[in-house]
């Protein structure tokens, strides 16, 4: 166990009685109320940040003041922390000799901690990653701290706040009955099918051998859906003990249970109650960290040093995945971050999240539920980290959830990274032994965390960064990401890379021409799949070559429409993968210039056969004879026109960039050999 954790556990009053955290909080609150405004004005030490001075002067916030004390290099121990074999093995995937050990693995020395404690402060956590300690302190103690020679800077520990989740009414699912080969998912079938973990479960993948750390409000370890789950370690970073099941709120109503939110999140990943709730990765090992406080059912609070301490603890134990199902954005009045600090480099919680990722941990967090928050309509922290996988939420029909926080980050990066089901997710209800439907990005994140665990089990050699990139590259909108869905819907099956039928995109052929296209597969299975096809156009045949590849033979036929869609299937018995392709058929040399689709809704392509010669210009006129768009002999980067494989593309916008209205348009195309007038119909 890390040194700071031992010190926290062993710190006693009169060597017998464990410190009562609420008593300390009350005493410090009373002391802090006596600090005059003049303290900030008289402060002589340049070590205090403006935020720390402002906090002491204004006494803002709901909790006693907690400060970060940043230390110099001479406060660091001579030896790095001890790590478990599991932690070293995880790091060894990236660095097999040095195990990624650097200066951030050296803890604060005993001598420095003793000198800090001698000023009278209470040390909450000591961070080796930030080279800092967080402390409860009054103004006189802060002055003593600033006088220590190894203290470089003193700042405020932020108190972050986030909204709670909501129960939702049960809605029709429209899901086919389970077959005998499928798990008895009960009401959790939708969420498993939505991210395609049911396909991985049928391959025997349950997360075995993967260690997942969950940071949340608390956990009902006795719930029937969770009492058989493998729990490796627990720690309460609020009260500094190992009980994560306790209820800290004064009222004993269900919504006031401290472990309500954490239990629900954990059950989405780990639940194991047949015919009721099957989690995404019920076979994984779990580390449970109690880091957040909730007592009113509407708001959850976190001092960011709790999250950072939990991340360092999880790293040392060997966590492969950290998932944090709470997004943070508002702090105490003197501690709030501004939007321009949402840049991946400013918030300490984000810096720590990226540090965990640098240790070969896949860090996953909710994007936030603030889309309609007028004060903060953005993603939350630490979702802004460039190495943090931020998860947005969608409905069961794959449309965007009304609450899911949008990007971008302050420095313009796409966020969230991916999205998945976040409305009507089935979860366990703490204390009652029952279940409910919940909504929020809080429940999107654990779906991705569980799916990532199955992918790790399938390929244990894969690094966290490789899996991060695979999750993005296999999402549904990877080619056209945006700041609502990110790179699209998450698929655990595709991220696991069990079997992939590599897409071939568009196949183009002229009438009478013959072309051949090689079909390939990839993935982590040694079984050779069978390749078949469906809805093949006239003149198209597929031959399975017996080695995971196939030969698609295409003969251009005038019987085919301008565009024809067909499907390809790779099947090795236990699972299948499907991809779609488009066949585009040119006319003959006498029909060298033609357009399609026509009518068109959004965009139209002009096809130029080799007989047409070199492209020179294209102009589009509306029915009133007004020119709405043109392009002259230019194929550089443009939002309006591209030319590839003998095509010109008009995206249905005018020269001002606005979409044109529905109606009839005339397009004049000039090439080096001929001129054509094409009549187009744009629909709504």
Image (cartoon, rainbow, N blue to C red):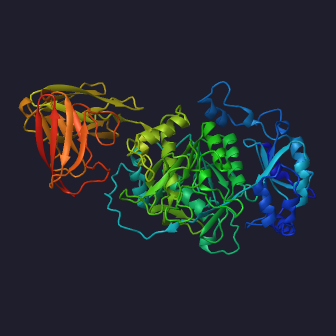
**Residue 308 vertical placement versus 55 (above, below):** above
Query: Where's residue 18, x and y in %?
Result: 85, 59
**In front: 288, or 485?**
485
**Image quadrant for the C terminus?**
bottom left
Decide if residue 112 is on the left or right side of residue 168. right
Query: Where's residue 365, x and y in %?
Result: 56, 51
**Residue 575 vertical placement versus 156 (above, below):** above
What count of labels does the image hold? 0
Decide if residue 10 is on the left or right side of residue 479. right
**Residue 405 vertical placement versus 543 (above, below):** below
**In front: 209, or 415?**
415
Query: Where's residue 308, x and y in %?
Result: 69, 49
Residue at the location (63% across, 68% down)? 257
**Residue 565 vertical placement versus 165 (above, below):** above
* Residue 352 seen: yes
Query: Where's residue 71, x and y in %?
Result: 82, 43
The quarter of the displayed image where residue 63 is located = bottom right
* Residue 1 seen: no
Decide if residue 553 is on the left or right side of residue 16. left
């Amino acid at each position: 166990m890390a040194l700071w954790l031992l010190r926290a556990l062993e710190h006693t009053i009169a060597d017998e009685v464990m410190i009562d955290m609420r008593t300390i909080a009350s005493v410090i609150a009373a002391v802090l109320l006596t600090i005059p405004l003049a303290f900030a004005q008289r402060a002589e030490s340049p070590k205090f940040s403006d935020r720390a001075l402002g906090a002491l002067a204004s006494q803002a916030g709901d909790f006693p003041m907690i400060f970060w004390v940043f230390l110099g290099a001479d406060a660091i121990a001579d030896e790095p922390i001890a790590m478990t074999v599991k932690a070293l093995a995880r790091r060894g995937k990236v660095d097999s000799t040095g195990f990624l050990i650097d200066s951030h693995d050296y803890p604060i020395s005993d001598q420095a901690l003793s000198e800090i404690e001698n000023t009278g402060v209470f040390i909450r956590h000591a961070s080796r990653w930030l080279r800092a300690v967080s402390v409860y302190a009054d103004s006189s103690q802060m002055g003593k701290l600033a006088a220590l020679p190894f203290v470089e800077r003193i700042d405020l520990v932020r108190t972050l706040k986030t909204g709670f989740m909501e129960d939702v009414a049960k809605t029709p699912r429209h899901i086919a009955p389970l077959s005998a080969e499928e798990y008895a998912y009960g009401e959790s079938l939708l969420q498993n099918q939505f991210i395609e973990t049911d396909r991985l479960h049928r391959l025997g993948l349950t997360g075995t051998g993967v260690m997942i750390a969950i940071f949340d409000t608390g956990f009902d370890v006795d719930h029937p859906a969770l009492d058989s789950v493998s729990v490796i370690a627990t720690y309460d970073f609020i009260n500094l003990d190992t009980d994560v099941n306790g209820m800290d709120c004064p009222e004993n109503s269900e919504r006031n249970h401290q472990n309500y939110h954490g239990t629900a999140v954990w059950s989405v990943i780990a639940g194991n109650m047949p015919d009721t709730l099957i989690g995404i990765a019920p076979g994984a090992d779990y580390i449970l960290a109690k880091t957040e406080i909730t007592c009113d059912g509407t708001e959850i609070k976190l001092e960011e040093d709790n999250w950072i301490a939990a991340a360092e603890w999880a790293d040392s134990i060997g966590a492969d995945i950290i998932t944090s199902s709470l997004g943070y954005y508002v702090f105490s009045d003197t501690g709030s971050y501004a939007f321009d600090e949402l840049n991946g480099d400013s918030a300490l919680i984000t810096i720590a999240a990226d540090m965990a990722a640098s240790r070969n941990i896949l860090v996953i967090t909710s994007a936030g539920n603030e889309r309609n928050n007028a004060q903060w309509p953005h993603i939350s922290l630490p979702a802004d980290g460039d190495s943090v996988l931020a998860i947005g939420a969608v409905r069961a029909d794959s449309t965007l959830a009304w609450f899911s926080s949008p990007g971008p980050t302050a420095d313009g990066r796409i966020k969230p990274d991916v999205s998945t089901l976040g409305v009507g997710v089935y979860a366990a209800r703490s204390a009652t032994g029952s279940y409910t439907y919940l909504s929020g990005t809080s429940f999107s994140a654990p779906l991705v965390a569980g799916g990532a665990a199955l992918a790790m089990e399938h390929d244990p050699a894969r690094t966290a960064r490789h899996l991060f990139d695979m999750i993005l590259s296999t999402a549904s909108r990877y080619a056209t990401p945006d700041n609502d869905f990110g790179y699209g819907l998450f698929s655990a099956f595709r991220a696991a890379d069990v079997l992939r039928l590599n897409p071939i995109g568009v196949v183009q052929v002229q009438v009478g021409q013959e072309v051949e296209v090689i079909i390939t597969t990839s993935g982590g299975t040694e079984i050779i799949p069978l390749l078949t096809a469906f809805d093949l156009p006239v003149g198209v045949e597929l031959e399975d070559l017996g080695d995971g590849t196939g030969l698609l033979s295409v003969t251009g036929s005038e019987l085919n429409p301008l565009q024809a869609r067909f499907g390809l299937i790779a099947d090795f018995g236990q699972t299948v993968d499907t991809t779609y392709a488009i066949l585009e058929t040119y006319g003959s040399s006498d029909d060298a210039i033609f357009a399609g689709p026509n009518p068109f809704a959004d965009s139209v392509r002009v096809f130029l056969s080799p007989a047409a010669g070199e492209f020179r210009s294209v102009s589009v006129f509306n029915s009133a004879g007004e020119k709405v768009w043109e392009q002259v002999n230019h194929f550089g980067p443009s939002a309006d026109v591209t030319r590839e494989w003998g095509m010109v593309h008009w995206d249905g916008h005018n020269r001002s960039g606005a979409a044109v209205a529905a109606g009839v348009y005339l397009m004049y195309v000039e090439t080096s050999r001929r001129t054509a007038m094409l009549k187009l119909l744009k629909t709504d």
